[in-house]
Amino acid sequence: MLNVGVGRSDITPPVGIAHGGWGAATHERAEGVDMPFYATALYVTDGDLEIAIVDLDMGILTFGIDSQIRQAVQASTGIDPDNLRLTATHTHSGPIGLGSWLEGGKELIAPYEDSLAGRVTEAVASAKWAAKPAHVGVGRGECAININRRPALPNGELFTGRNWEGFVDREVGVIGIDGVDGTPIATVVNYTCHPTILGPANKLLSPDYPGYVRKVVEQHVPGLCLFLQGAAGNCGPTHGFIGEVAVAEWLGTRLGLEAAKVRLEIDPVPRKERLIEVVASGADLGMYEDEPTGEPDDTLRIVNHFVDLPAREMSSVAEAQAEYDALEAKLHEVRKTGDAAAIKEAVKNAKRAGITVSSARIGETGAVNMRIQAIRIGVAALVGTPIEAFAEIGAAVKDRSHADQTLFSGYSNGYQGYMPMADAYEFGGYEVNTTPYAAGAAEDTIEACVEAVNALWR
């Protein structure tokens, strides 16, 4: 039998920290907090294997922070670092990392990042301490708060907005974990949508809609809720890039209610009905009992599979860094003028140059070595990748999986950039222009993910 526990710690950044990742923003520091940021951990063991999955309210999980957390968790709990899944929600209303173009609030970044390993370890340790016998069930729903985000202008130029004709994955994947007495322990929700409801005008630290999803689910279902971001590379919210947190709450509530409905219908134990008796009344009343028909699937397995993917040709790291340094210096001078329009232009240029540097570093050897982590918990499979995968990737993996329910996550175990489908390269657009991968990498990734998932059932 599986033993499962959940734990949570507060990882809210300090007010005043360098904030937001928007080239169109003119503010630098976060001016307040919309709602807390959390690290929510799920611990699962079969008595031999120990696995922990952590949902983090973060924008990007760098490999540096990822490594620090793994080392701290192992030292405190004994969990093998390879058996830890760290998944960022990818909120765009969190702090910016070190090396950004922002100046105000930069001094708070390093102390905050240094605190994360200890805070996350607290959540994992609490989850392990709380573990008790449990069973796992699955369900799925649908919610239309997302949309393909790659529309085109009349001249064919792509921008980030609403493409009602483009591919979108609206499945709400849910895993429900109950104690043997039927009391819910945890709910895991998987959905595909960039947390970009809050845009350049927002000055508050916010987990965006995933924070409200968790809040709503926990209002209706006992236990804690984890949110695992999906293959959101080309999918965003139907209402995005705005400053009103009420809209993030609205969309998050809609998704949370759908997830809660699905969760309340999950029973991990297989059952069949049995008629006990018919009681005479105004009408004859049938009295039924639902009897267990077998034991739930309590299999626990994990696979860490590495694949080499082709990198596209791009500027060298040195060339990209030189351009960024020049644009950052120009931004520093422009900020002194107080000219909002000029600042926006300079911020945009510096941000785009910074993205080029990141992509150049990821693909500088000509190939990208990527980890695919597949976990089986009973009848459910959870696939984790460190990319901003196009939604077609996640949908294909889920469609070809042997599991009753498969949750596909990007933004997991580090970060290695956007991954478009091969047919997107001829059209260009933000994701194609910034990807470190050559065309065909997405299709290779699908095959590798399917292989990793199905190995869990062999």
Image (cartoon, rainbow, N blue to C red):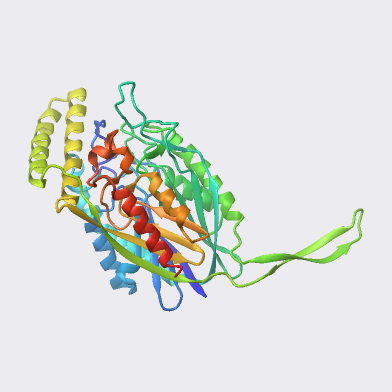
Which residue is at the far bottom?
Answer: 48
* Res 287 → quadrant: bottom right
Counting every numbered tag in the picture gives 0
Q: Residue at x 37, y 58 (%)?
A: 449
Residue nearest the observer in this picture, 291 or 345: 291
Residue nearest the observer in this picture, 79 or 14: 79
Q: Residue at x 40, y 75 (%)?
A: 49
Is residue 158 visible from the viewing direction of this image?
yes
* Res 432 → quadrant: top left
245 is higher (above) or lower (below) than 180: above
Which quarter of the rendering shows the C terminus?
Answer: bottom left
Is residue 125 visible from the viewing direction of this image?
no
Left/right placement of residue 338 relative to residue 259 reads: left
- The picture places residue 11, in percent across and down from the top left corner, at 34, 54
- The picture places residue 314, in percent across and down from the top left corner, at 15, 42
Which residue is at the far top?
Answer: 154
Q: Residue at x 15, y 30 (%)?
A: 335
- The picture places residue 338, in percent across and down from the top left corner, at 17, 25
261 is higher (above) or lower (below) than 274: above
- The picture places residue 254, in percent across and down from the top left corner, at 52, 41
